[in-house]
Image (spheres, grey):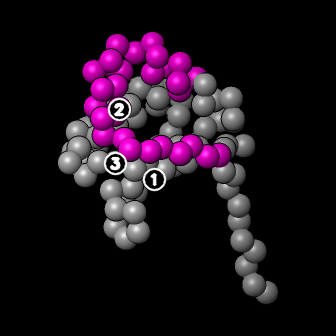
Amino acid sequence: MSVFLIATIEVRASLFGPFTEAMGTLQAIVESAGWKLASAYVLRTGQLNTVIDVWELNDHNHMNAGFAAVGMDPRAAGIQGVLQDAIIKETLTFADAISYPKPT
């Protein structure tokens, strides 16, 4: 059964373009370790320039495989500075999928 890693990322407005380009590279790296980007959103109300990424993982330990892939991939060096400059705050949380019962 899959678990979901939800990344809530506050991004500097002036670096939103470079952030999204760097995240495309990051996505390729962690997907090579088996992560799957289930969905990605940018908020248009509330805290503007906040991105929510929902990653599907095999289990809680699978997060470490993605982080290890980033650490070993030479492309990571090229995006590290961009992400450090662009990200104001990042919060990672785990979630499980649920179903709502249909009314009878």
Q: Which residue is mark 2?
A: 84
Image location of residue 58, percent across then percent down? 65, 35
**SS category of the residue bearing label 2:** helix
Q: Nearer the viewer, residue 45 or 37?
A: 45
**SS category of the residue bearing label 3:** strand
Q: Nearer the viewer, residue 18 or 81?
A: 81
Q: What's the residue type where badge 2 is placed?
A: Gln
Q: Which residue is mark 1?
A: 52
Q: Are marks 1 and 2 in contact (CB under 8 Å)?
A: no
Q: Is residue 13 magenta-colored?
A: no
Quadrant of the image occupied by residue 92: top right
Q: What's the residue type where badge 1 is placed?
A: Ile
- Judge from the rendering whether residue 41 lies leftward or rightward of residue 99; answer left or right: left
Q: Quadrant of the N terminus?
A: top right
- Alpha-carbon span between mark 2 and mark 3: 10 Å
Q: What's the residue type where badge 3 is placed?
A: Val
Look at 49% across and 19% down and name the residue there. 69
- Judge from the rendering whether residue 3 lies leftward or rightward of residue 30; answer left or right: right
**Labels 1, 2: front one:** 2
